Amino acid sequence: MLPHLPPYLTWFVAAIVILLLIWLAWRRPNRRHLIWRVAASIVAGASLVCLLFPPTYQKAIDPATAILLTENYNQDTLNTLVEHTNASPLLFSYKAKASRGATPVPDLYTLRQQQPGLQTIHLLGQGLETQQLEALKGLQLVPHLNTAPAGIYALHWPESVKAGEALVVAGRFKGTSTKATLYLQAAGTLQDSTAMAGDSSTTFKLRFIPKQKGLFVYNILSKEEEHPDTIGQIPVLVEEPTALRVLLLAAAPLFEFRFLKDYLAQQQHQVAIRTSVSKDISQSEWLNMPQTSLEKLTPALLQKFDIVITEPELLQKLTQAERTALQKAVSESGLGVLTIAGEQINRSSATSFFTSFGARRVGQQDTRTTRASWATLQATLTALPFAFVKDDAVSAIVEDQNGLLLAAGRKAGWGTVAVTAIPQTFQWQLESKQSTYNSYWAHVLSAVARKEVKESFWQLLPSRIPKPNQPLTLAYTNYALAGASGVPAATILSLADSSKANPSFAQDAMQPERFTTTFWPRQSGWHKAEAPEAEPYYFYVQDTTSWKFADLQAKQEAVAAFIAQQHVVSAATPLAYTKETIPLIWFFCLFVMSSGFLWLEEKL
């Protein structure tokens, strides 16, 4: 390719070449295809000159606007954005495959240095992390980010569970044209699965009951067309079951309370039971705990228990002072109260604090047989012909196969009150279904009993999935240090290689009992955070390949936060112009076709 010539000289040379070719075509004796030979001569001459002296045109460029391509950007979005701009924006790629002549940039600070006139950046692809966005402060950011990809795009599970309680992994899944199945794998065995419909977005739950305490890592697998793939890990701390202090109050001797008392004692719970045998006469029994008077319910007595299990008839027999003491123990001290309905749902105003749940009749008989579900199990049982009404304040504890509530609870101050329409569960024991009985009562007790209040505890902020070489925020709360001016001394230990870090904490100005630090994990695996007067806190750093949606979600949240804080007013910037060379491939193709025609036509 020769240097560019002035336009008039280029066309002068082109004219001479074209006239020469036309003259050669005209002087041939054979006059057939003369018009086609002349046209081909003109095209061949013009294209040859354009190949030797490429023509250019002026292209308008907006030096204040740029498009930044990040990972997995959408090509259609890029094309639409470029085609709908009056002046071409600058085009750059960051950790993404370049397209349409995009200039790769090693980091965003370099971009700012090389393009000091930038005012607006259109961001395409997955987005940027918080620390990467720091380089773009002072610029107006316009997002064109990807939507949620196919697969799991939202996920939640508890950090810890008690041994014998259900671990529930819940999330949302976006399907494709191919049906998929999700599995929960523990100890190399598939424990639960759920089939996901194709071309739809739906919720899912996977359940498993761990039996042993310790630190465990379970796996979520996805299987499409016989191709299983591990898509992420579920780290869980399984703790020793908490020994509860249970008070049983029965209006008459019942098998249900007798079997429940024995079961609770076998599980090492502290149990006290008061059973009315006649007017003003009751029997008391204590298991795994010292004897104390149960004749009257007083604030001092109720403070010794975590949950009271009773029935409507006994609640009505209580004196007003006892009901008031029980109500205050719930609302002010966090006590849980479970009422087992006997023959019907009690609606007495005297006991409304404990039993005022909306209910509707779902059967004409005195009882109904239904299929109930809770945690990870389902079982057939006999229930009252009523179902509790769901609302924002009422939470489901046990449901039937139609989603109707058989047992429901609601918060009442610091504590919980609950009612169950399942009057008899001891039948499971008589039928040798001990595991069903154990699971049911472990689930119900966990939902209703007094929650443990900790003076000091750790939190992972935000509650997203940690990964190596990405910052995470740890918060340590200690109410005993609320008035102190010093900060706690804490260490973070990697259980994989025993490496330690001693991060510095900053005290929250609005919450003086709270301290935060930023930690950069270097490798995946379990980590332990320790501080004086606090239980060790275990958290798991995932592999870089796990939970791809978490990276996308974190970047999009960072971009949204950045945009919410930006206050940039773009100033008017004059357009710049650059010379662009017309692609030579077009002239080459025209030259080949026209000269080929001239050669072939002469031979024929």
Image: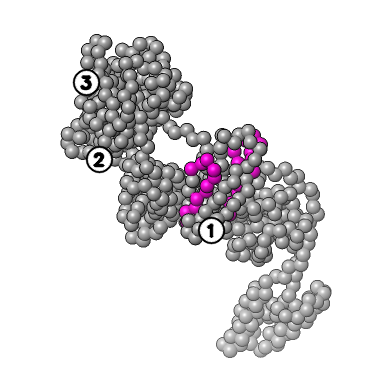
Stretch of the chain drawn in magenta: 506-535
493 left or right, relative to 274: right
Q: Position of residue 323 (x, y in %)?
A: 38, 15
Residue at 60% in and 34% down: 482
Q: Amino acid at mark 3?
A: Pro
Q: Is residue 484 above or below residue 130?
A: above
Quadrant the N terminus occupies: bottom right
Q: Which mark is residue 435?
A: 2
Residue for badge 1: 499
Residue for badge 3: 253
Asked whether 572 falls inside the magenta stretch, the response is: no
Q: Earlier in the sequence, mark 1 or mark 2?
A: 2
Report helix, strand or loop for mark 1: loop
Residue at 25% in and 38% down: 436
Report helix, strand or loop for mark 3: loop
* Residue 71 in which image quadrant: bottom right
Along the line of sight, the residue nearer the viewer: 415 or 453: 453
